[in-house]
Each structure stands twice: as C-alpha cells, then as structure tokens.
Amino acid sequence: MTSNKSVLSWIQEKVELVKPDNIVWIDGSEEQLEQLRAEACATGEMIKLNEELLPGCYLHRTAVNDVARVEGRTFICAPTKEEAGPTNNWMDPAEAYEMLYAIAKDSYKGRTMYVIPYSMGPVGSKFSKVGIELTDSIYVVLNMAIMTRVGKAVLEALGDSNDWVRGLHCKCDIDEEKRYICQFPQDNTIISVNSGYGGNVLLGKKCFALRIASYQGKNEGWQAEHMLILGLQKPDGKIRYICAAFPSACGKTNLAMLIPPEGYYKNGYRVWCVGDDISWIRKGEDGRLYAINPENGFFGVAPGTNEKSNPNALASTKQGTIFTNVAHNLDNNTVWWEGLDKNPPTNAVEWKGNPWNGQESTEKGAHPNSRFTAPAKNCPCISSEFENPQGVPVSAIVFGGRRAKLAPLVYQSRDWNHGVFVGSIMASETTAAAAGAVGVVRRDPMAMLPFCGYNMADYWQHWIDIGAGLDPEKAPKIFNVNWFRKDDEGNFMWPGFGDNLRVLDWIIDRCEGKVDADETAIGFVPKAEDINLEGIEDEVSAEQLKELLSVDVSLWGDEVAGIEEFYGKFDKIPDALAAELNTLKNNIK
Ligand code: OXD
Ligand code: MN
C-alpha cells in the first residue's frame, strides 16, 4: 500500500522481532472491516448484538485484570529523567527498548500482524498527523477504525515523509506484571505490551494525541490538550467555540453534548459537539487560536449515560458501536449498564462473563469503567465544522474540577498568564467512585497530569509562550468553572447538566465584552443578576446563587499551601507563574 521507505523498513524490523504468521494491511474499506468483524465473532473475541435494535454493534470483554489505563505502568522514555519531569514515570530509552523488545520477541507467533495507517485529524489537514499502529488484536483494529481515520488515503497523504508516529502493540499474555505503556517522544514511538484495554492500546488516543503530540506541539509551536470542543449557538445564529479541560469523571462528554434548558432551546440556543476529549490548537492566519478534534469517535464511559444525563451520547451508541465490559442482555441480545435505566435485565451475562440477574444480584453488571466506542458522525449534535481542516476559532478556554467548597461556580482570569496559572493549579476532589479516600484533593494541571509527554514545568512555559505570541484582543479568554459546590449539608448547590449552559452563556458574553463582573482576589466573578435562573428558581434561590459565586479567602489561604507544595515538586517554575502565585498570596492577605 506504500513505497515509503521509513514505513517499510520499520515494519520489517518489527516483523523480525515479533514474528507474525501473517501480515494484513488495513485499507479502510468496509469489506475488509466486515471480514474482520466476522472473524472476531467466529473466535468469540466479539459478540454481534441485535441487528434490529443495535445495527452494526458488538460487545467485547477484556480480561478481568485489564479494565483501565495503568498510570503506574505508563512511562515517558525521554533521554533524561529531568525531561520527563517529576509528574511522569521515567525510564531510560535504551533500557526501555531492551526490556520491551524482550517481552515482544516472538509474541505474534501463530497470530496475525495488522498494520493500521491512521490519521489524527481530517486526512491531509495541516493540523493532522499520521501514525502507524501494529497490533495483533482485531478489537484494536475495529476500535481504531471508529476512533481515527484509517486506511490507504492516510498513506497517500503521508507520501514519502518520515513524520509519522510508530506504534507497536503486543497483547502477549495480558500479564499485569509485564504490562507497560511506553512513549518515546524523541523517537515518535509508542510501545504497549500485555494489555488489550482501550486507553492502553488504541495508540492514537492518549499515547499519541496527548503524550507524543504535546511534545511535538512544544517543538512546533502548537498545543495538544485534554479538552472538549463545543460550539455555542446563540439566538443570533452565531456560533462561538469553547475548549474545556476537566479531570476524569467531571462530565466532559456531557458538557460537549449538552442540551440547553427548555427556555433557552426555544430562544434558539444550541450546543454543537466538535469533540469530547482532545483538542489540537494552533494559531491561524488571522492571529486567533483554532482547534480541531483529532479523533473520529467517542470512547465514552457507559455507566451513568442515559436518556437524561446525555441523550446525545446515548443516541451515538445506537449503531456501529463497540461496547466493552458492559452487561449482555440475553433476552434481546442488547447491552445494559448501571445508570442506563431502572430496569436491569434478569437474564444476562455480567462484564466478566458470568450469568447475571440484574434484579437480584448485588454484583455490578457493567464494569464502572466500561465503555462505548461510537462514531462521531452518529452524534445528533455533531458540529458541521467537525471535518473542517482549519478547525474552529476558540473564544474561551475553560478549566474546571470538583471542589465542594473552594471554587465559585465560575470565574474569569485577569489575563492569559493568570489563566495559565488557574490551569496549573487545577485540582479535583476524589469521589467514592474511585478507590481510596473521598474528598482528597488531587492536583491535575490542565487535566494533563497523566497525559503530558514532557516536563510539566516546560509545558506551562509553553502555554506562557503561546500567549506571548497572541494579540491579547484575539487570545481566548480563560475561565474556571466548578459545577460541584456543596452546601453545609453536603447537597450539590448547582443543578449542572443542561443548566451549565447558563454559565457558558455568561462566559461568551464576557468574551464579547457584553457583561460586567466583580473583581475578586482570584479573578472576575459574575454579578449575581447576570446568571439567568429563569426556570430553575425553585432549585437555586438568589441567596444560593450568591453563595455559589462567593470567594472565601480563608479557604484560599489553605489552597495556597497546597499549590506551594505541588509547585515545590518542580526544580523550576516559570517566572510568570511564580509571579501569579505571589499576586494570589497578596490578594488574600
Ligand atoms: C479518557 C480518560 O478515557 O481521560 O478519556 O481517562
Ligand atoms: Mn480523557
């Protein structure tokens, strides 16, 4: 399919290492994918679901010890530990290659090597980047064919170029003790062994589009961010775009596909989804920042997705979708997960493959991290700009986390550098959904803690440098939101979901200079009368809104100590951020 020498020689090397019985190049044709689906069903790797209710949909179960990304076994193999920084695991590249090649050696014997040429971003766009993943898993091929653009056209766009990311995935024995997800940013290379689970093996996603791409972006003057992209259409018909970064379990997919509250909808408000997880951002010819979503599908968490929380996500899963680790309803050959509805199936198989009666069992039917891999084109609110090779102009960047007391519902940074500071101090409180203590603050700057491919201090400096190259008039305005503030009884004070539009609306008005704000110690906070509560007055009283917008400087005093402790891990902090921390300290004195 290609005469590109760098591609052919790299594949040849890897063939000699892993020794497959056969080699199959993925050409992107529907016939070839269909053949692979049939083969996966014949071996039991996938189960074909009800063609009438869920056309083109399949179920897959991973090994029970292989159900999530493994941050502890994920390494940035840069030449020095300093280049990886204190927040990444580091391994010397030579040692890493030696160890990984020893694990991968002969591991494809008796298996087929699939060669997946894929593009992150629309094929041929100047934003886009090519990768080639070698895998011995049909499940990986079929997921990659949903999450990225795959096939011949990608190799044609690549031509003879050597600018592509090498990815080797070997299932091996799914041995947890020998599971490694290694990125070699300087070599444009990813090696993943002993896993068959999404985020560890769909190498285009976290490994390439965030870890490798963040490093490429630093060198090439652009940014790879863990951000959704949404278009907010106002009654005037104009659409403004927002990129937003939240840590896991803070509702990125829900916000990206938000349905406006009824009154807003009637007035012509709409939200259009460009992406739910990753943004690649660069300066356009007009001096504004533009973003694309490099992915082509959604790899969403299934539990909790329902007709109320996210009808658009649910609709996206109704065809051509692969479900992983959810419950299998044997009565109608469909799928079920906790939080889908109140009617679990009685004649079912749970995610581990055991018989399951959802009405009687205390076990979960779906794994809490069970997933759907759904084509973006299925989403009823997919943006008309989804395929635009130029991307969309970014009006606002929004950071956020889960803070019961500290952060107000929304605040705006004073300027770009203050906004970078706000992103760098992002943190979220742990929930009961994850193992460990509840309510513990975990720092997760820009939601990139597990995904930054180099030293986070250099990453922050890169953010500062990007801002320095922008006309402040054209630079996106930077905000922080907190949908999770609680009252003294522990109840959430803000309804969230569709009502978050009320906050997005204020954000865009601020970007366009249409609304005033109060300056506080931490930035600009809305005047209470500027957050429209029409339709939710019963849920949020004027008093409660005031509380939601309040800034408690004594709590910020404790927060400063936490920020200093976190910054203290780094040998260097950009001067601009040290100055912002000083300003915060002075402001709360
Ligand atoms: C994801 C994640 O799967 O951030 O998107 O973990
Ligand atoms: Mn993510």
Image (spheres, grey):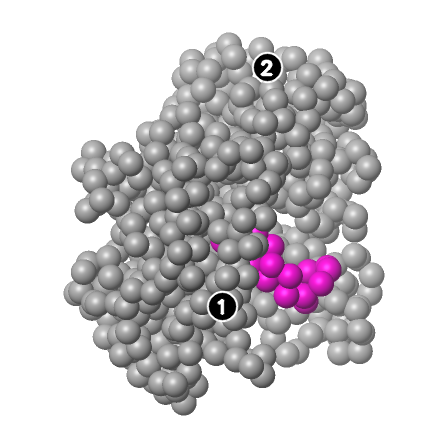
Ligand 1: does it lie within 8 Å of the C-beta at label 1? no
Mark 2 lies on residue: 10
Quarter of the picture containing the C terminus is bottom left
Instruction: Please tell me the numbered disc located at residue 563.
Output: none
Q: Does residue 458 appear in the picture of this structure?
A: yes
Compared to 291, does 78 lie above or below?
Answer: above
* Majority secondary structure in the magenta region: loop
Q: Earlier in the sequence, mark 2 or mark 1?
A: 2
Res 206 → quadrant: top right
Nearer mark to the viewer, of 2 and 1: 1
Question: Residue 439 magenta-drawn?
Answer: yes
Mark 1 lies on residue: 554
Judge left or right: residue 420 versus residue 83.
left
Kindly state the secondary structure of the residue where label 2 is placed: helix
Q: How many marks do you count on the picture?
A: 2
Q: Tell me where the magenta segment starts and ends, as one range.
A: 426-444
